[in-house]
Amino acid sequence: METDVDVYVGRYARDAPITAAPRGDDMTRITGSGRSDASFPTDAEKIAEARRSPEQFAAVFDRHYGRIFAYAARRLGRDLAEDVASETFLVAFSRIDGYDTNRPDAAPWLYGIASNLIARQGRAESKRYKTLAKLSPDEPVGAHEDAIAGRLDAATARGRLAKALGRLSTADRDVLLLVAWAGLSQPEVAAALDIPAGTVRSRLHRARQDMRTALGGRALQ
């Protein structure tokens, strides 16, 4: 279930300075993440085909690269995200024999691999949150005083949120951001990180509480 924290963290992600364009044709040809319409095979079907014909894995890459890149970019910045996204698919391809083809959507699997790779860049991620915490929106020329005040309030809230994200444990941050930024459900997060559903719930609850505390316990707008 999405909460005000998830919505706010999602807005924060959209405000972060990222110039990432999706690659492939996932937005025009795929209905949902990895779920096909009547004309296109699922991720699981393409992975099964790739075990015999490796070139078939390109369809999975095309469908998901943009999302994996954008997620990594929000956490690490564009330059490191390119490496993480590319390595995610290299690792995934090396593991296609072990993929559970009962799962038609490969997105949780790919996000799990990406999360492990991001965890190796802990120092870079911490530095990024510190940088984002210092950013404020440019003020429009001639803006009304109330509008300026509102923008400054939003900048302050984002700064607090960035600091709080940097202080979370890697485990709690992974769960929160896979929900709020990657848009995964709690069962999908459990599958992505290979942890029990109860662990996802407890980590998510703790992370959400920390986000609320970071904003002074106020309702998020």
Image (cartoon, rainbow, N blue to C red):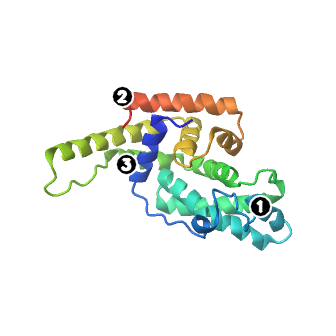
> In the image, residue 13 lies at what x, y percent?
44, 49
Quadrant for the C terminus, please: top left
Quadrant for the N terminus, please: top right
Helix, strand, or loop for circle 3?
Answer: helix
Q: CA distance from mark 2 to mark 3?
A: 21 Å
Residue at the spot x=58%, y=50% of the render?
Answer: 118
Which amino acid type corresponds to the residue marked 3 in the rendered image?
Answer: Leu
Q: Are marks 2 and 1 in contact (CB under 8 Å)?
A: no
Which amino acid type corresponds to the residue marked 1 in the rendered image?
Answer: Ser
Q: CA distance from mark 3 to mark 1?
A: 35 Å
- Marked residue nearer the N-terminal end (2 or 1): 1
Which amino acid type corresponds to the residue marked 2 in the rendered image?
Answer: Arg
- Marked residue nearer the N-terminal end (2 or 3): 3
Query: Which residue occupies the extreme right position in the image?
Result: 52
Residue indicated by mark 1: 94
> In the image, residue 88 lies at what x, y percent?
65, 58
- Marked residue nearer the N-terminal end (3 or 1): 1
Circle on res. 218: 2
